[in-house]
Amino acid sequence: MNEVIWNVGSLTVLLTTYSPRSRYGIPVLRVRHPKGDSDLGPTDLLPKEGQSKSPAAVLLLAIHAAHPLTGKALEGARQFLRQWPDGPQLP
C-alpha cells in the first residue's frame, strides 16, 4: 500500500506499508516535507516548533474530516488507527 491522502504544496501525507516501521501489513503515516520524511504510528507526536504537539492519529482524522477517505485509503486508515485501541477510530 502506498496511498497519498493529502498533498498541499511541498507537504505530502500518505499511508504506506513500504516502511521498516510497518508491521504485518499495517500502514504507517508518512509525512513528506522539505525538512525530511517522517514515518509515524498513531501515537507518535507530530513535530511542531513552538507549539503543542498532537499525535499522528489527529492529523489523519483532520484529513479525513476535510476530504473523506474511501476505498484502500479508508481501510488503511482504519488499520492504522486500530494500533491505538484507546485512541480515536473511524467507523
Image (spheres, rainbow, N blue to C red):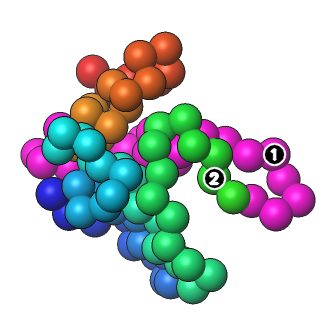
Percent coordinates x, y for residue 34 in the rendering:
57, 85
Spot occupied by residue 52 in the image (x, y as percentages of width and height): 81, 45
Q: Determine which quarter of the picture holds residue 91.
A: top left
Q: Is 69 on the left-hand or right-hand side of 42?
A: left
Closest to the observer, 83 or 81: 83
Does residue 81 appear in the picture of this structure? yes
Residue positioned most to the front: 20
Give whichever of discs 1 and 2 has the lower sequence position. 2
The residue located at (37%, 28%) in the rendering is 83
x%, y% of residue 25? 17, 44
Q: Is residue 1 above or below residue 54?
A: below
Return the residue nearer the eye: 47 or 62: 47
Q: Which residue is mark 1?
A: 52
Mark 2, other Cα within 10 Å: few <14 / some 14–19 / many ≥20 = some
Quadrant including the N terminus: bottom left
Mark 1: which secondary structure?
loop
Q: Residue furthest left?
A: 71
Residue 82, compared with residue 42, is above or below; it is above
Tag shown at residue 46? 2
Could you tell me if residue 63 is visible in this image? Answer: no
Q: Which residues are magenta?
A: 48-75
The amino acid marked with disc number 2 is Leu
